[in-house]
């Protein structure tokens, strides 16, 4: 490779403001959707009860709902899983001991298997929500430290902005579609965090390598040239990698049971948003911040290496 990176016809940095504007517009729309519709919180985060039923025969949501109606109960939702021989009924309120006993006796006699009933109190729901937030916060801090040590702190901050960008879009779509948010949703978000930061790290690593071939990096134009070249070099890899997972997530969404569908949908949304943010948000933000840093401090070529 020559010591001077050649200009590329794909000028991603030139259109950075368009990328920022698109993301900003979607964030505003997503924020309005969350404010208007809110989130459809499952019992994991809002308290309530969950009844897991199992039968030797195929079940239908209408059949299960009718059985609960006959007992005088009205579940918020009934979903099928396990190929149709399992059903999950969710209640927004906690079931009492007498109510649990009635349900167990009825469905044990009806299906020949005792249902598994779990309840989440408001205190437990608050603890779960708090722990989920702490998990995301710890992951974010760890990512900043890792990227800052391996690369530089500006790239660490850019990576975190991209991750929040991805997580927000998942939340916004779940709010618009009113898909239930439960503990598997947190698992999906953490999974997306891993995929997104992997894409971002690959891009930043290529930027660092290309910076070493530059004799002088003193202006924003120099940084932009390196970023454009790096994005072109990693674009095919990023798209091919995410497509393999998108196909798997799409298959789970279409053919998977109701229980796993929210997880698969969250993966699909996050994978698309993660690839977009890694290529067009994180790297562009770093280019802008790095250009301002070089302009302010007038780094020497040696100091400007990543």
Image: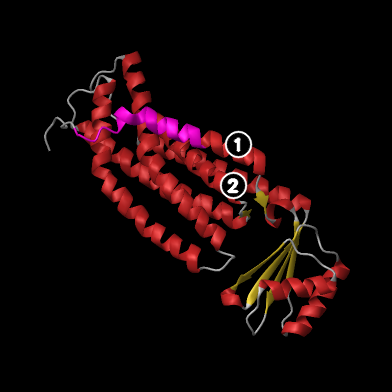
What residue is shown at x 60% (from left), y 36% (from top)?
A: 32
Residue of label 1: 32
Under circle 1, the secondary element is helix
Residue 118 falls inside the magenta stretch: no
What residue is shown at x 44% (from left), y 45% (from top)?
A: 273
Q: Residues within 10 Å of mark 1 (few under 14, many from 20)?
A: some
Quadrant location of residue 55? bottom right
Under circle 2, the secondary element is helix
Residue of label 2: 176
Nearer to the camera, 202 or 180: 180
Residue 87 position, x and y percent, is 66, 72
Q: Does residue 33 show up? A: yes
The extreme left residue here reads: 2
Residue 92 position, x and y percent, is 76, 57
Nearer to the camera, 200 or 151: 200
Q: CA distance from mark 2 to mark 1?
A: 10 Å
- Up the image or down, 235 lies above or below 95; here it is above
Magenta-drawn stretch, dominant element (helix, strand or loop):
helix
Nearer to the camera, 10 or 282: 10
Side of 7 where 12 appears, left or right: right
What residue is shown at x 20% (from left), y 22% (from top)?
A: 216
Residue 104 position, x and y percent, is 79, 76
**Figure colour scheme:** secondary structure
Quadrant location of residue 200? top left
Q: Does residue 285 show up? A: no
Side of 153 where 229 appears, left or right: left
**Which residues make up the magenta segment?**
8-26
Residue 13 falls inside the magenta stretch: yes
The extreme right residue here reads: 98
């Amino acid at each position: 490779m020559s010591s001077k990176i050649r200009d590329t016809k794909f000028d991603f940095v030139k259109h950075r403001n368009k990328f920022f504007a698109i993301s900003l517009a979607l964030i505003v729309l997503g924020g309005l959707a969350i404010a208007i519709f809110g989130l459809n919180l499952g019992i994991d985060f809002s308290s309530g009860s969950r009844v897991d039923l199992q039968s030797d025969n195929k079940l239908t949501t209408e059949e299960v709902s009718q059985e609960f109606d006959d007992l005088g109960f009205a579940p918020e939702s009934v979903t099928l899983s396990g190929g149709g021989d399992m059903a999950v009924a969710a209640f927004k309120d906690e079931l009492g001991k007498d109510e649990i006993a009635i349900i167990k006796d009825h469905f044990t006699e009806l299906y020949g298997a005792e249902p598994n009933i779990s309840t989440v109190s408001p205190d437990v729901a608050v603890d779960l929500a708090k722990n989920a937030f702490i998990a995301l916060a710890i992951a974010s801090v760890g990512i900043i430290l890792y990227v800052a040590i391996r690369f530089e702190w500006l790239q660490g901050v850019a990576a975190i902005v991209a991750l929040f960008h991805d997580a927000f879009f998942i939340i916004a779509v779940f709010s618009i579609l009113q898909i239930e948010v439960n503990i598997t949703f947190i698992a999906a978000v953490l999974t997306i965090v891993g995929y997104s930061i992997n894409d971002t790290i690959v891009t930043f690593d290529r930027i660092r390598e290309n910076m070493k071939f530059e004799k002088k990096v003193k202006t924003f134009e120099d940084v932009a040239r390196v970023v454009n070249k790096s994005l072109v070099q990693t674009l095919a890899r990023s798209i091919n990698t995410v497509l393999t997972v998108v196909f798997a997530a799409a298959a789970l969404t279409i053919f998977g049971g109701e229980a796993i569908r929210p997880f698969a949908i969250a993966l699909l949304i996050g994978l698309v948003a993660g690839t977009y943010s890694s290529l067009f948000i994180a790297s562009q933000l770093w280019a802008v911040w790095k250009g301002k840093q070089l302009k302010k401090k007038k780094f020497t070529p040696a100091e400007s290496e990543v």
